[in-house]
Image (cartoon, rainbow, N blue to C red):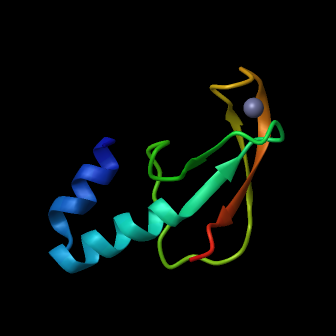
Amino acid sequence: MTFLQQLLTEVLPKTWAEDMQAESLTWMVRCPCKFERSIWEIGGIRWKAKGSPRRRLVCPKCGQRTWHTVYRKPG
Ligand SMILES: [Zn+2]
């Protein structure tokens, strides 16, 4: 966990913290090469959010800095 994730997990009521982590795990970032990871996995938090923004990130698979699509995994 990153510092921010740890901090929020500690200060928020347990149910909120679990909800935050669970929701962050359903938000994915996908590289144009099709490699994807969850927001939580890259040290981020996405909670109570909507929409599909784009993030410029380095992809561990293709090694390129590319525009990743952020989307919520269905289910
Ligand atoms: Zn890639």
Q: Is residue 48 left or right of residue 56?
A: left
| Residue lying farthest to the front in this orientation | 75
Seen in the picture, residue 6 relative to 48 is either above or below; the reply is above
The picture places residue 14, in percent across and down from the top left corner, at 16, 74
Residue at position x 70%, y 39% in the image: 35
The picture places residue 3, in percent across and down from the top left corner, at 29, 43
Seen in the picture, residue 1 relative to 49 is either above or below; the reply is above
Pick whichever, 3 or 38, lies toward us.
38
Q: Is residue 4 left or right of residue 65?
A: left
Seen in the picture, residue 5 relative to 26 is either above or below; the reply is above
The picture places residue 44, in percent across and down from the top left corner, at 47, 51
Residue at position x 62%, y 67% in the image: 73
| Residue lying farthest to the top in this orientation | 63
- Tell me the quarter of the picture where residue 74 sits: bottom right
Residue at position x 33%, y 50% in the image: 4
Quadrant showing the N terminus: top left
Quadrant showing the C terminus: bottom right
Please count the marks in the image: 0
Residue at position x 45%, y 70% in the image: 23
Seen in the picture, residue 17 relative to 69 is either above or below; the reply is below
Q: Quadrant of ligand 1?
A: top right
Pick whichever, 57 or 59, lies toward us.
59
Q: Is residue 52 left or right of residue 20?
A: right
Pick whichever, 39 or 35, lies toward us.
35
